[in-house]
Amino acid sequence: MGDQLSTAEQLAELEAALLEMDQVSVERGGSPQAWNRLTDRAQSLQLVLRETPEGRAGITALVGHGSATVRLAAAAYALFWDEPVARAELERQMNGPGLGSINAKYTLLEFDRGTLSMSWRPRGT
């Protein structure tokens, strides 16, 4: 998935998937099935994007996005190549409201333990 598209197109698809995830979050009454489908889509895209400097830079740029969901996911991905930027965003979100604060906390805990993986492949890929 995604590797026939330009980097800009892949980044736009990643942003769209993450924005859609925000809309179907449990906090908004969304379905876990929709969330999982979008998580797989975003993961497939980031696996391709992280392979190039341009892709990594694009993901890191999403850490400054207007959506907290986009920032959280982008920061989790970017921890592996731009830790200072990613960590700063995750620490900001840890002090915020909602499930994002819990996700940010455990993302950093797992990263610091060396157990966070962003290289998993969605089923069927």
Image (cartoon, rainbow, N blue to C red):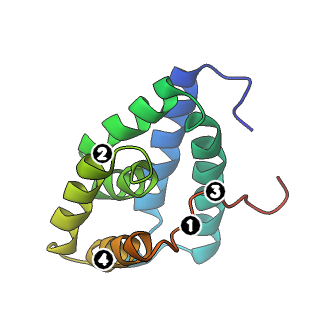
Q: Nearer the viewer, residue 117 or 59?
A: 117
The residue tagged with tag 1: helix, strand or loop? helix
The residue tagged with tag 2: helix, strand or loop? helix
> Can the viewer see residue 65 in this picture?
no
Q: Which residue is the site of mark 1?
A: 35
> Label 1 amino acid?
Trp
Q: Is residue 56 above or below residue 6?
A: below
Q: Residues within 10 Å of mark 4 (few under 14, many from 20)?
A: some
Cα distance between the residues tagged 2 and 4: 16 Å
Q: Which residue is the site of mark 2?
A: 63
Q: How crowded is mark 1: few (under 14 residues within 10 Å), some or many (20 or more)?
A: many
Q: Earlier in the sequence, mark 2 or mark 3?
A: 2
> Label 2 amino acid?
Val
Write the residue at 63% across / 56% down: 119
Q: Which residue is the site of mark 3?
A: 119
Contact check, label 2 and label 3, Cβ < 8 Å: no
Write the residue at 65% across / 72% down: 33
Cα distance between the residues tagged 2 and 1: 20 Å
Residue 105: which numbered mark, if any? 4
Q: In which quarter of the image is residue 102?
A: bottom left
Q: Which of marks 1 and 3 is nearer the N terminus?
A: 1
Q: Position of residue 70 (x, y in %)?
A: 37, 51
Cα distance between the residues tagged 2 and 3: 19 Å
